[in-house]
Amino acid sequence: MKHNHNKQSLPQKLSAIRQELHRQPELSGQEFQTAGKLARWLHQLQPSILLEGIGGTGLIALFDSGNQGPTILFRSELDALPILEANQFEHRSVKEGVSHKCGHDGHMTILLGLAQAIAQKPPLRGRVLLLFQPAEEIGAGAERMLNDPRFEQILPIDFAFAVHNLPGFPMGQVIVKEGPFTASVQSLIIRLEGKTAHAGEPENGISPALAIAEILQESKRLSVPDPQSPDFAILTPVHLHMGEIAYGTAAGYGEVHLTIRTWTEPAMEKLSRYLLEYLSKLVARHNLGLSTEWTDIFRATRNEAEAVAHVIRAAKELGLNTQQQELPFRWGEDFGAFTQRFRGALLGLGAGVHCPALHSPDYDFPDELLEPGIHLFRTLVDNILE
């Protein structure tokens, strides 16, 4: 860090780090500078193990007390979004069309603050694992890290926690829920291969037009938008393409891109299976070739009861207001890949009622959340490891 941190208070230091990360955002899978900066900073704190380049640009810092005890993993994200920043403040993004509009700069800083707290006063037993994952926004980085052979070095893991700031909730409020916390989300690209013909003689070709219309109708029919329903599902057409702008030619190729959401993994598996069966029957009827591709896969984040109880206890000890969420959030969160494997919880931290929404061009992570986030994680460490 180039700042003169010595004369600053801790909140000022944290804020300066967060703003430096905000200034230099990097897209999913390209977080080389960000990871390098964090690695240099963590290296000064002398963790027992510092692993770089896990699953791409992923980073793991392990603080081991040397005494038997549980292992707690805390996860943060490295990547920014392809969104042009509308803010004009001093720490605005220097990269045209790329900015931290999900608050990953804040989440990273919370983990750095926790690292400093652990280095200054290590727990008496067990291990604390700080993990910074790439490519969260495209639902790819968590699996890449988990599948990296070097990840095995740090197992076993007893608990996994992550925080996400939530605009629209009171500043510093802790938002928790047992069971599904964020939806299972994945996107399906459907490619329909027919045959072009003269627009005046469409019967000589094979057009995907009617099949596309049927897919759109079926997507609407399969959607169960009632969040209270166990069959909750939203199928959203996000992109369509058919033929070319050539008025003498009847289309011979088409694409439909859908985003699919359910509350649980089994529901997603069932719906995915049904869709693929439906499509193969549809193309047979329309005499089309079919290829499909799944992308941007986010596993449902499933919060385990004991992990949630730890979060509620820590929040109470710190005098932070706690809100029990009745329904899961509809967005996807790559932390789901961790909660499918380890007992864990994703918790929300209110970013203020009037804070611009996540992914808005004018969003900025509120620095007032850094300290409550660090204290909450530190308290979890103390309670589980002491």
Image (cartoon, grey):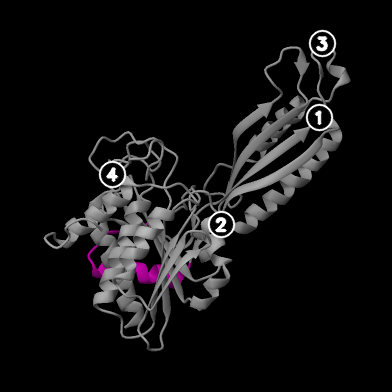
Does dot 2 land on a helix, a strand or a loop? loop
For residue 233, above or below residue 141: above
* Residue range (magenta): 304-325
Q: Would residue 360 be visible to someone looking at this image?
A: yes
Q: Is residue 160 magenta?
A: no
Viewer-closest of 349 and 371: 371
Q: Is residue 309 magenta?
A: yes
Q: Please tell me how crowded label 4 is: few (under 14), some (14-19), or many (20+) other residues with Cα within 10 Å.
A: few
Q: Residue furthest right?
A: 204
Q: Residue at x 41, y 36 (%)?
A: 97
Q: Which residue is mark 2?
A: 299
Q: Which residue is mark 4?
A: 353
Q: Which residue is mark 3?
A: 200
Which of disc 1 and disc 4 is earlier in sequence?
Answer: 1
Which of disc 2 and disc 1 is earlier in sequence?
Answer: 1
Q: Are marks 2 and 4 in contact (CB under 8 Å)?
A: no
Q: Would residue 313 be visible to someone looking at this image?
A: no
Looking at the rendered structure, the number of numbered marks drawn on it comes to 4
Residue 216 sits in which quadrant?
Answer: top right
Q: Are marks 2 and 3 in contact (CB under 8 Å)?
A: no
Q: Say what amino acid the circle numbered 4 marks.
A: Val
Comparing labels 2 and 4, the label whose residue is closer to the camera? 2
Query: What numbered label is drawn on residue 194?
Result: 1
Measuring from the top left, give residue 110's x and y in whole percent.
31, 61
Measuring from the top left, give residue 13's x and y in whole percent.
20, 58
